[in-house]
Image (spheres, rainbow, N blue to C red):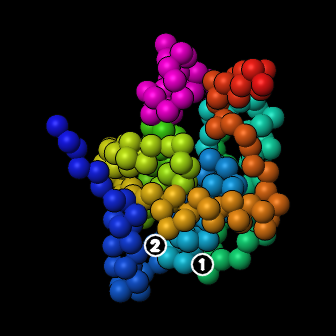
Amino acid sequence: MNVQRINYQKELEKILDRLEREKRVPKLLLHSCCAPCSSYVLEYLSEHFEITVYYYNPNIYPESEYTKRLLEQQTLISEMSFKYPVSFLAGRYDKEKFDEIAAGLEHIREGGERCFKCYELRLAQTAETARKGGFDYFTTTLSISPMKNAQKLNEIGKEVGERYGIPYLCSDFKKRNGYKRSIELSGEYGLYRQDYCGCQFSYESRKNKENIK
């Protein structure tokens, strides 16, 4: 059975067009995985929202890498110019929570069920934080990566949004040359671009490839 794939970029554009007509500037809690991925997303969405960048990534390994990416995110926000305000909020480094959801899935290939559980972990925490903080929407930068499953991300985001009672802003930020633009912005701002997704499993996979070479 063929499952019809949704164009989430078009879904996002419909929302942005409506906000423009209504002359509304909602509050958005934007989960960010790293500065490079957030660069284009911030450039794009800050034309329509007041954004708080929420850095919650308990999957990142080792902790020194987590801290490096966190500081890079703060630096980028301080250096970029925005139409509407952009602020920053750091989540806890809950490494044990990632270890719990990854248990039993250690040998699953990158991009599979372990990653989907990681999406849900981070999106659920973002949704809960957004609800408590009185935000109008929440979303994530993750869909900008060609390595991430945008269809699954949006399915999980919408389900989590319904669970916590806050709208998930659907997206596929790699569209409209978003990923390409993020690379350009990374160059403009001299951003550190990591060479692995973030978790221990992607870190070890990268190391193994280096050893093979």
- Residue under the point 50% across and 60% down: 173
* Label 1: how many Cα within 10 Å (few below 14, some 14–19, many 20+): few
> Percent position (x, y) of residue 23?
41, 86
Q: CA distance from mark 2 to mark 1?
A: 10 Å
Q: Which of the labelled discs sits on residue 84, or is there none?
A: 1
Examine the rendered structure and indicate whether residue 40 appears above or below residue 62.
below
Give the SS element for disc 2: loop
Q: Give the magenta part as a residue range.
A: 94-118
Q: Earlier in the sequence, mark 2 or mark 1?
A: 2
Name the residue carrying label 2: 26
Q: Can residue 138 be seen at all in this image of the molecule?
A: no
Outermost residue to the top: 104
Dividing the picture into quarters, in which one does residue 206 lie?
Answer: top right
* Label 2: how many Cα within 10 Å (few below 14, some 14–19, many 20+): few
Q: Amino acid at mark 2?
A: Pro
Dividing the picture into quarters, in which one does residue 212 lie?
Answer: top right
Say left or right for 129 vs 37. left
Q: Amino acid at mark 1?
A: Tyr
